[in-house]
Image (cartoon, grey):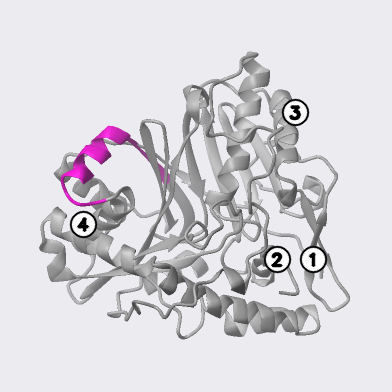
């Protein structure tokens, strides 16, 4: 492709949704901002593909250039600066902190949570080293002096996609989309209140349950949320749709790729099926996940994006490129497939002894009834995100967890406070 995969989300408008990611790390002790500043700027040397700023080439295309300026570490304030602005040295990432909390902000164009977490973990590792004068055992964390892994920064290409015919094609059953919620959450200033809650679980409570119910961590939370919505949605909504993002990089031969290369899995739950026992629901959910994450299926979905990006790369003029992706973006067009809710799982992350210094970490993005699941050592965290300050969904979610006998702790709601982009025009 003419342009890097990292640039294409930069063309998407932010009139309604932020295109940024925030990872909130809650430490067990008050954070020293000066030490954090040093640690963050040491850690970024290990991830040079994140230290960039945006320029526009002669054809009107966004290009990322190496940024040699410091990564900015600010005191947290209610007003969040823009990515790419002079306040953050034009970087597409920055950090802020207050009390025991550290917030890592980054452009969603550069990566998703799974790609972003290694830099966060390296930064926290280095902070622990410098603040406590220790060398924690953490083989799962990349150290500032470590070499880049095989394929970590290799551009995605057509050649990595499977040539096999898709073994499955998802045909939606018209799941309900919460249009009224979105209209209020996006346009009604009296209702709009982007927020998140943090749920914490002991990993053993989740794993012991799923072992007996033919489930995985991801499928467990997909089923729990579907059952929660079954308690609150009207009977006329006959199908509740779960959605989960899938990064097929490992299956396509790029296990260490940082790029946000995603396909999507959809599971439609007819209301009568939500009366099934948990084992049967878990089997159905995992079966759909296995089918839709097959490389032949995810490659077919990704191929459409590659074609779109190649076509857009040939268009002249920044405004024309923005208009083109607005008309053809498969995530927002007439043929887009949407679930009623989304559950994403970044997978088990090995923090080693660094986990002893961390109380929790969660991923925060824009969305409504969007759950991001993270885990470390013996703990699992869920950030439950909404556009409305609404309790009925979280009350139902908690009710299902209690019925299943799954202990949890909850904090929040907190305002999302996501960044946006300042881009060349």
Contact (CB < 8 A) between labels 4 and 1?
no
Q: Earlier in the sequence, mark 2 or mark 4?
A: 2
Q: Where residue 396 sits: x, y (%)?
A: 24, 52
* Residue under numbered circle 4: 282
Rounded to the nearest whole Å, what is the CA distance between mark 4 and mark 1? Answer: 44 Å
The circle on residue 7 is 2
User: Residue 171 or 239: which is nearer the viewer?
Assistant: 171
User: Residue 206 or 187: which is nearer the viewer?
Assistant: 206
Residue at position x 81%, y 40% from top?
A: 70
Q: Earlier in the sequence, mark 4 or mark 3?
A: 3
* Residue under numbered circle 3: 38
What's the magenta region?
197-215
Disc 4: CA contacts within 10 A as few (<14), some (14-19) or many (>=20): many
Q: Under tag 2, what secondary structure?
A: helix
Q: Where residue 357 sits: x, y (%)?
A: 51, 23
* Residue under numbered circle 1: 63
Residue 221 belongs to magenta span: no
Relative horizontal placement of residue 170, taking residue 111 as reference (left or right): left
Hey, which residue is sitting farthest top in the picture?
Answer: 133
């Amino acid at each position: 492709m003419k342009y890097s995969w990292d640039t294409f989300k930069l063309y998407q408008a932010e009139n309604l949704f932020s295109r940024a990611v925030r990872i909130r790390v809650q430490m067990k002790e008050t954070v020293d901002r000066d030490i954090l500043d040093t640690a963050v700027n040491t850690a970024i040397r290990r991830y040079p593909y994140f230290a960039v700023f945006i320029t526009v080439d002669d054809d009107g295309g966004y290009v990322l250039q190496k940024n040699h300026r410091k990564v900015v570490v600010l005191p947290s304030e209610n007003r969040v600066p823009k990515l790419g602005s002079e306040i953050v040295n034009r970087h597409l990432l920055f950090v802020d902190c207050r009390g025991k909390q550290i917030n890592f902000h980054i452009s969603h164009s550069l990566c998703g949570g799974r790609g972003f977490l290694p830099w966060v973990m390296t930064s926290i590792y280095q902070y622990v080293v410098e603040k406590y004068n220790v060398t924690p055992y953490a083989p799962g964390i990349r150290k500032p002096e470590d070499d880049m892994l095989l394929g970590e920064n290799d551009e995605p290409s057509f050649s990595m996609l499977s040539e096999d015919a898709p073994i499955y094609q998802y045909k939606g059953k018209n799941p309900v989309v919460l249009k009224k919620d979105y209209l209020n959450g996006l346009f009604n200033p009296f209702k709009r209140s982007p927020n998140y809650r943090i749920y914490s679980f002991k990993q053993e409570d989740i794993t012991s349950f799923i072992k007996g119910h033919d489930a995985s961590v991801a499928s467990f939370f997909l089923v729990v949320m579907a059952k929660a919505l079954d308690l609150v949605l009207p009977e006329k909504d006959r199908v509740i749709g779960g959605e989960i993002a899938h990064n097929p990089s490992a299956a396509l031969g790029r296990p260490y790729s940082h790029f946000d290369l995603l396909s999507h899995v959809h599971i439609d739950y007819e209301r009568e099926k939500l009366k099934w026992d948990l084992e049967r629901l878990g089997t159905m959910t995992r079966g759909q996940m296995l089918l839709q994450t097959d490389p032949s299926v995810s490659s077919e979905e990704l191929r459409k994006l590659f074609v779109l990006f190649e076509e857009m790369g040939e268009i002249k003029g920044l405004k024309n490129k923005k208009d083109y992706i607005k008309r053809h973006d498969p995530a927002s067009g007439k043929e887009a497939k949407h679930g009623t809710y989304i559950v994403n799982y970044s997978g088990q992350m090995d923090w080693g002894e660094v986990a002893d210094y961390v109380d929790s970490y969660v991923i925060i993005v824009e969305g409504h009834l969007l759950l991001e699941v993270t885990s470390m050592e013996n703990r699992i965290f869920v950030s439950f995100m909404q556009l409305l300050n609404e309790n009925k969904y979280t009350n139902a979610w908690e009710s299902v967890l209690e019925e299943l006998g799954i202990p949890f702790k909850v904090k929040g709601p907190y305002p999302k406070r996501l960044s946006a982009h300042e881009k060349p025009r």
